[in-house]
Amino acid sequence: MSDDRTVAGIKTALAAQVQEAAARYPANRSAIMPALELAQTKFGSVDGTTYQAIAELLDVPEIWVFEVASFYTLFDRAKAGRYHLRLCTNISCMLRGAEEMLLELQRHLAVQDGGTTADRLFSLSGVECLGACDKAPVLMVNEDYIEDITPAKLEALLAALKREWQEQSAEEGAA
Amino acid sequence: MSDLVLLRNIQNPEAPEVAVYESTGGYEGLRNVLRGYTPDQVVEAVKSSSLRGRGGAGFPTGLKWSFVPKDSGKPHYLCCNADEGEPGTFKDRILMERDPHQLIEGMVIAAYAIGANTAYLYIRGEYGLSIRRCEQAIAEAYAKGYLGKDILGSGFDLDIHIHKGAGAYICGEETALLESIEGKRGQPKLKPPFPAVAGLYECPTVVNNVETLACLPHLFRRGVEWFTSMGPKDGPGPKLFCFSGHVKKPGVYEAPMGLPLGEMLEVYGGGALSGRFKAAIPGGVSAPMFPENGFDVKMDFSSLAEAGSMLGSAGVIGLDESASIPRVARRITEFFSHESCGKCTPCREGLTWAAKILRRIEAGEGSPGDVEQLEMLCGSIFGKSFCALGDGAAWSLGAALKHFRHEFEALIPAQAQPVQEMRLW
Ligand SMILES: Cc1cc2nc3c(=O)[nH]c(=O)nc-3n(C[C@H](O)[C@H](O)[C@H](O)COP(=O)(O)O)c2cc1C
Ligand code: SF4
Ligand code: FES
């Protein structure tokens, strides 16, 4: 992830890919969604500076960018934790215990639905159907689907993610 | 299971590769089309196949295509709707992940028929694997001459671009989907004009579901007669059904249309998870549920419509004896309320209010009159919403209230006082 989150920094980081995206459409405005996604992948979230940078790159009004960023739930306007847990609580997952699991996760991580843990390791959101209802209950950890979850599987998963993070921070500390 | 059509490659992990797809007859349908059909003849063949859209509304595909003007002087667009967000539905994801070329081939045939040289494949953002598989398949199709300039020497050009959704169920509604590709908030637009006349960038546009398009290669490889021999006359062809909820064998199955709901729940769903079924939703949460005594309804477009529901997305959700219908209704209503785009009052305000009442009933804090209040709300939303999201929400809630009124009433404490509420409109 890049760190230079000035307008100039964001523009430099994204210019080539945003132009490539814009070339796929007859109107620049269509490239706002792809540009926001590119920005989020690079910087972890999108904010006012991002909107300005994208507006300048695409030569569109900044409000158009903000409108899109605020409408679609996959754009994170606040930086999420290292692992964003999105637990589906919709009907087929609910019928197999997802709502109870969400409560359990809230207790375990001591966060509310939509919150991030104090160590910024986990963000937790109850979400709508993820289109994997045959593997209910379903959880996304960042971009990955974890299917057929059970309380035991969840506990193991959280422990594994914590370990992964500790190992990575130890490596970073050593480097 | 050798007679599978749409799922014939599903067990083959190598099917996403173009050579493997070709070895099972892949791109033969497209070759037939480009060699032997004018675009109008393709439209006519699809009309005579009676293929109906698999995205939810069941609209006749050939008829939809025939609305595209011939001499508009503008570019035409094809958009594939892969925003799959209807709870209980996961068939399009399987088609894209396991057999992406089947979809790409279908898109080329459809684009040829409507004279589109650009197509957008709108895939919901969460479907990372579908996106990667389709990107890969598109790249292979270009390399093999199935996409790009002068496809298979026919003089027909087509580019396909993927547009990723970003988590908004309403973008599955076709006009909202087009707004989203234009880079706007996904809010439905007034029809008419229909997309076929003024759609993407105000140009003639056809929006079709993944499964609808995936039928086309087979239709043009094996012929109209073969196609119409499968299932009901007024809407034949191969069909996918998704089973989830309280069933023993959740999954995507290909089955002929027209089998009774109860039989499908046993044969494909594997029966109730515990005890007996109490009810089932036949086509995603927008489709009104059937109580067990209605399980003889046939699973096809017309039979379900006659029985007051719909085939919708063919997402069958089983509810066994352990299911609380008020809870199910509360969760479904919360979903619609959450996904309401906010454009029109009946849906935006009505669903917020209905969800609030359902939450208090479930918590044991309901009041006498709450069920009537909910019925009143359903009546004020259904038919008065700007798009089918509000209608579907009210329609499905209405069925839960109708068939399981006693379950709602049983949760309302006998001594509770009626709650006075303001009418909003
Ligand atoms: C709220 C709402 C959500 C929808 N979601 C989808 C969807 O996820 N996928 C889909 O193909 N159609 C969806 N539709 C139906 C589309 O508007 C459209 O009818 C369909 O994509 C047309 O394709 P078809 O003719 O091939 O069925 C939705 C409709 C509404 C009102
Ligand atoms: S019915 Fe709901 S989703 Fe449809 S336009 Fe109205 S507010 Fe938006
Ligand atoms: S209901 Fe949870 S994935 Fe569909």
Image (cartoon, helix red, strand yellow):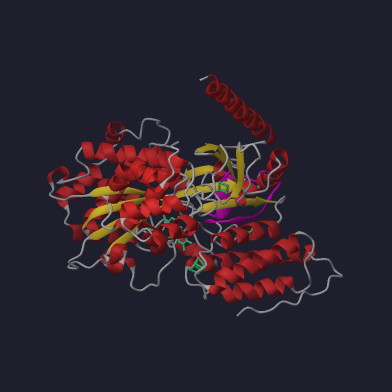
- For the N terminus of chain B, give its image quadrant: top left
Q: Given the current orientation, which residue lies at the most extreme top position?
A: A174
Up-down relation of residue B8 to residue B326 (above or below): above
| Residue B412 can be seen, yes or no | yes
In percent of width and height, residue A36 lies at 41, 49
| Foreground residue among B362 and B20 | B362
In percent of width and height, residue A63 lies at 42, 61
Up-down relation of residue B392 to residue B264 (above or below): below
Is B313 on the left or on the right of A107, as rendered? left
Is A174 on the left or on the right of B404, as rendered? left
- For the C terminus of chain B, give its image quadrant: bottom right
Please identify the quarter of the rendering in which residue B98 is found: top left
Q: Residue at x 20, y 47 (%)?
A: B32
In percent of width and height, residue B234 lies at 39, 62
Tell whether position B281 is magenta: yes
Which residues lie in the magenta part? B259-284
